[in-house]
Amino acid sequence: MKKIAFILLLGISLFYLPSCQKEEPTIELHPPEANFSASSTVIYKGMTIDFIDLSTINPTSWAWSFSGGTPAASNQQNPSVKYTSPGIYDVSLTVSNGDGSNTKTITGHITVNDATVQVLLDNNISLDDILTTNPIDSLYGKQYLGGLIFYHYSDQYISQTLVAANVDQSSGIHWGCNGSDLTGFNCSGSSIGGYSLNGTIACLGASTAWGTCDYLVYNNYSDWELPSAATLVHMYQNLHLKGYGNFSPNYYWSYCETNSTSSKSVTFSDGSISDYGSKSSSRRVRAIREHYFNK
């Protein structure tokens, strides 16, 4: 009898034993969910897209992949990517945290279209970016910031671009200040750029070659200048000889003075420089604008 009672008690104890054991806590993992957007999905070659991370659940690291882009991969949260070749490209983002990772890929997300240089300029693509896939000659004669591009120089520090007005500002006007030797205007033969006096010298007023540029408002710009002789040569070579600008095969004034009675001009019949054009003679004028960009 005692043996039977013991067996029953043991069975009851074993039956209830699991309910007396301590349960292990359940650990919930919260990996992130990848998501993103792009500033644009249809662009022209040479343009840059800003990608924005929209992932949720606290990601702590990002691994992007951009087919056809530069860079082709990035660990930044919100990278910017340049596309220089036409095509259709995928974008992928993997986000991670201590609980795991998640990937989102959009196939054919970015469409990069080919474009003419003028279209790229109109879409505010920098000239340096355009020149990564196009020769410098492709810039000449294109409309940019008020005029026609005819000169571009770039190094690691600065970018300089010159544009000429689309038409002549005068078909015949004197240089000004005949009989006066003006200090500071004896520019060298290789001097590139223009000069503006803004009416500060009385004998170079509105009715002179200088004033024609100083007081010019054209294509919504008012900072036009009289070009140097070397600049006019570039204009002749890169615009006139290529059929741009509607130039006349006659002399154009530069701002470069030779002496008290003569100044330099350039003939657009052959691009040669004349050092001794009488300041009182009538010659044509084509204004320029200069653009400098610090890098």
Image (cartoon, rainbow, N blue to C red):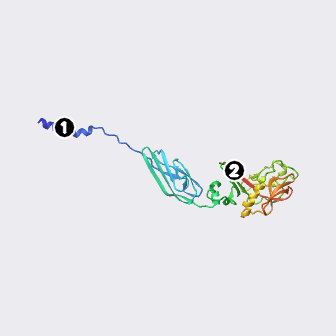
Q: Secondary structure at mark 1?
A: helix
Q: Is residue 146 visible?
A: no
At label 1, the amino acid type is Leu
Q: Outermost residue toward the top?
A: 2
The residue closer to the viewer here, 278 or 197, is 278
Q: Quadrant of the N terminus?
A: top left
Position of 199 with respect to 219 (left or right) is right
Q: Position of residue 258 (x, y in %)?
A: 84, 53
Q: Position of residue 102 (x, y in %)?
A: 44, 50
The residue carrying mark 1 is: 10
Camera-nearest label, 2 or 1: 2
What is the quadrant of residue 9 in the picture? top left
Instruction: Characterize the local packing of mark 2: few (<14), some (14-19) or many (20 or more) Cα atoms within 10 angstroms.
Output: few
Q: Residue at x 74, y 60 (%)?
A: 237
Q: Residue at x 63, y 61 (%)?
A: 116
Q: Is residue 231 visible?
A: yes
Position of 180 with respect to 152 (left or right) is right
Q: Earlier in the sequence, mark 2 or mark 1?
A: 1
The residue carrying mark 2 is: 292
Q: Residue at x 12, y 35 (%)?
A: 2
Position of 46 with respect to 224 (left or right) is left
